[in-house]
Amino acid sequence: MRYQQLFYILIITSSLNFLNCNKKEENSNELAKETSSYLLQHADDPVHWKTWDDTLIKHATTNNKLIIVSIGFSSCHWCHVMEKETFEDNAVAIFMNNHFINIKVDREERPDIDHLYMTAVQMMTGSGGWPLNVILLPNGKPIYGGTYHTQKEWISVLKKIKELYAKEPDKLHAYADNIALGIQENNLVKIVKKDSLLSKDTFKNHINQWKQRWDMVFGGTKTTQKFIKPSEISLWMKYAYLSNDSITQKQVIRTLNNISNGGIFDHVGGGFFRYTTDEQWKVPHFEKMLYTNAQLLSLFSNAYKAYKIPTYKYIIEKTANFLLSEMKSSEGGYYSSINADSEGKEGKFYVWNKTVLKSILKDRYNDFSEQYKYQPLHKNSKEKDLILYKNTSLDKNKQQDNEYAISVLYKQRQQRIKPKIDNKIITSWNALLITGFVDAYKALGKKDYLKQAEKLADLVYQNAFEGNKLYHTLANKQSFLEDYAFLIEALIKLYTVTSNEKYASRANELTAIVMANFSDKKSSMFTFTESSQLVSKLIKINDGVLPSPNAIMANNLYRLGILFRNSTYLKKSKIMLSSMIPFIENSFTTYSKWNTTLLDKLYSFKEVIVTGSNAASFATSFHSSYLPNTFVVYSTKKNNLVVFSEKHVDNETFIYVCEEGFCKLPTLSTEEAFKQLKN
């Protein structure tokens, strides 16, 4: 079948008897009591949706009911389409209610469940997506999985699965057991204690093989749809710098230029959409995700430091302004996403009619239409539903500032009915934004970005950290590795630019919790959850839309190991990286974040330690430069951290360039320190 994608999951549900009217409360849709925007969107469906509950597996087995688990998120366009076409249909709902236990999951609230499904989907098919719809045996093991289905396809699948389960349950159980075993094996990471790394030549060979799949016209990789992958582009940028690879550098700039100029960037309001449906970055799917924009804030900040291209500075400022004005809550946290649809139509808030453009811009229209081109959202839309993108073929001498015209369009667009916002405040995604603001501050020197980062860091720490646990969201108190990993990374970054010891202390505190509660005894990695009722534990080592939390933790441990001269952290980080080498060799492009860390080892990771009264201004020189394999810390006074031990001299500002704790003779000038770094 077209959607025959199979994978595994542990399941829960309540004991239901759909023919017993005395259990009416169990047979109704239970989502109205939830706080998730996505779950509430399905609260009026005639399907008797339940929420995920790990304690109810026994009831599912007792009733011998097949289970449907449907996963999505609030700003997912095709999730809405399938709801309207299928889950709001009474006939479909009656069939689902009579023969299945039906569970809805918000993938943003429960990334553990989503990651487990997605791991299996990618393992079985090489791809995945949302809505994610799976059918499970009563014991929780999968027998069918797919993404979007039409109503006709969905009913056909349900009937066939029901019939097959009635006639040949043994075959389904055997098949599901094999899938479950495959997922368990997918989470096996063997400990490699020796310092096992790739050589520079082997790394180069992997990059050269990757180049064969690069899109040398529009950037990124050759695909019919284009997703911006910040971890990949960051890896290319770092490798190009360290290895002096001009081809890779050109690919980075080509990619960033095309996404800056294309329709995937909102030229009127700022910020990036999730992906485009074409290979040229022109026709977007109009969701705006916090994690996308947070990561791109960091990516363009580093790119601006590396290349000083003015467009990148503009993108940083425009994206930051969008986040501050459109995604920031009144309490100070940032919302998770903005819907693709408004007034029941995808992208309606963002597209333009040529006649309307002419009437709004008047005598400025001709100049504006020379600077921007229009891409129809649909093939038959010649004058309406137009997407704006930059005219890159225009001679540079003719390019001009169109901010006035853009401001006019922005004011007009603000009068439209806005897409809905998913108001979840997700710890891990907000942590990515803290890092984004810090990187923007380092690139542009704007103190407001640092101020925003510090405010957000304090808010997240004070509100999400409670009872020695860091919660994913306050509304649904779950703890996941990504929340710890991303926040620790952000706190370390904040410490490097502020020298405020509270950030180093908090990072160290959270790391100790991760080491105590998430360490996997059978591998060198950390599990995604502290404990889990899922049959297969989840160890997230690969990158997805978010970087691998284990890769981030390996980086965190190494940097904290330097700060506190903690040999346990340093050893753990090295073992984690060494244990990943077999995976990297087998599937190099899947592990960009690990490969970024690997480059630190191949090209000598440096420490720059600055002490003295002028240490802050000296450190700024390093922070504003693109030094991807360098860790910069400073202190203007005597400091308790071990990294500064015996390095402070009264009335002098010294710069120490070190490698693995061994330092060259200190220098009094940044120029000399840069020379030492280069040599």
Image: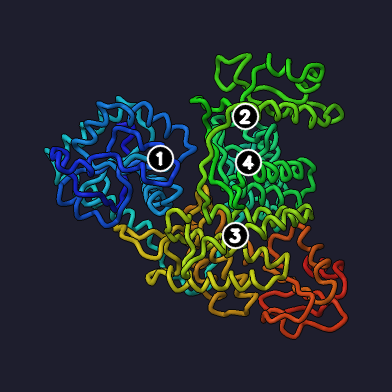
Q: What residue sits right under mark 2 in the picture?
A: 282
Residue 450's disc is none
Which numbered circle lies on residue 326?
Answer: 4
Q: Earlier in the sequence, mark 3 or mark 1?
A: 1
Seen at 69% across and 52% down, the residue is 240
Q: Secondary structure at mark 3?
A: helix
The residue to which callout 1 is attached is 40
Q: Earlier in the sequence, mark 4 or mark 3?
A: 4
Find out whether the residues at labels 4 and 3 contact each other: C-beta distance under 8 Å.
Answer: no
Give the position of the N terminus as an image quadrant.
top left
Can you give x and y, in whole percent of width and height, for residue 381 in the image? 58, 15
- In the image, residue 104 lies at what x, y percent? 34, 43
Q: CA distance from mark 3 to mark 1?
A: 26 Å
**Of residues 343 and 147, which is closer to you in this image?**
343
Q: Earlier in the sequence, mark 4 or mark 1?
A: 1
Q: Mark 3 vs mark 2: which is more N-terminal?
A: 2
In the rendered image, which quarter contains the C terminus?
Answer: bottom right
Q: Are marks 4 and 1 in contact (CB under 8 Å)?
A: no
* Residue 114 placement (x, y as % from top left): 40, 49
Say above or below: 108 vs 29.
below
Q: Are marks 3 and 2 in contact (CB under 8 Å)?
A: no
Task: Indicate the amino acid at tag 1.
Answer: Leu
Amino acid on which disc 2 is placed: Lys
